[in-house]
Amino acid sequence: LKSDGTGTLPDNSINDFLLDNEDKLWIATNKGVVYYARPYSILDDAEQEAIIPIIDNNLLFYKENVNTLAVDGGNRIWMGTNKGAWLFDKDGSELIEHFTSENSPLLSDVVTDIAINHLTGEIFFSTNEGLISYRGSGTLTGTYDKPKIFPNPVAPGYSGVITIEGVPFNSELKVTDASGRLVTHLEANGNTAIWDMKNEYLSDVGTGVYFVFASSEDGTERQLGKIAIVK
């Protein structure tokens, strides 16, 4: 894998690499980031070319330094650069988050390393000014017998989100009210789902008790927990 031959890397200076949850090989260099869709066949397939993600019709981080990579439980890719920390979807074609020292508590825009606690979703950013952590929404766990829901109950005046940890991997959930009427659908990132306390019409829900269900492969539903909201 060289920038002037096999593999078409953008640069020979490799800063970091990882295998994501779909076995794509991501490589961060001094001049951008690429991935290989079939990394295990690279040695047998000398013609396999690196894929440069495209976002908004532009090559992602073209000729820019990418210091570090990390993948969360939802197979989303974190990238640390000299211009902050970036979170992209699994193909690098959609920007989800961009943290800088101006719009977040990030200590510096120069992000040198990113590490993830896959059990809690906590993400650690190492910068040239120190270390700070952030609680993300993509976790990776093996069991979900007793999902953790917080805050719960929700007190009056709270306007944040409700986090549901320990749900089936990348599952689709539904929230109902106490009478069984559908309130909204949720999609988990890894083993964590986030609810903004809105219904499917994007209106805030009222005071009440709400139930969270997960669908299994055979079509049956399993109640994961209940949430009490007081407005």
Image (cartoon, rainbow, N blue to C red):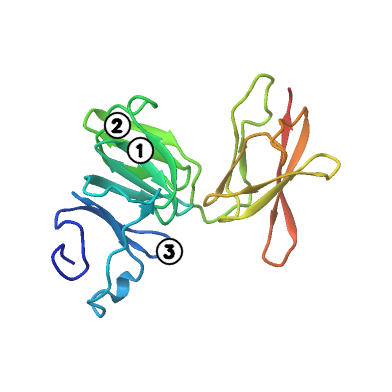
On the image, the x and y values in percent for residue 85 come to: 34, 38
* Tag 2 residue: 131
Residue 180 x, y percent position in the rendering? 83, 45
Kind of residue sitting beneath label 3: Glu
Kindly tell me whether residue 26 is visible in this rendering: no
Residue located at (69% from left, 36% from top): 202
Q: Secondary structure at mark 2?
A: strand
- Along the line of sight, which residue is nearer the eye, 67 or 4? 4
| Residue 184 seen in the current view | yes
Residue 124 lies left or right of residue 9; in this view the side is: right
The residue located at (67%, 27%) in the rendering is: 154
Considering every residue shown, the one lying at the far bottom of the view is: 44
Q: Which mark is residue 10?
A: none
Q: Are marks 3 and 1 in contact (CB under 8 Å)?
A: no
- Of tags 3 and 1, which is closer to the observer? 3
Real-space Cα separation, disc 2 to disc 3, in angstroms: 29 Å
Disc ID at residue 22:
3
Judging depth in this view, the residue of 211 and 100 nearest the camera is: 100
Q: SS at mark 1?
A: strand
First reached walking from the N terminus: tag 1 or tag 2? 1
Q: Of marks 2 and 3, which one's residue comes earlier in the chain? A: 3
Q: Amino acid at mark 2?
A: Leu
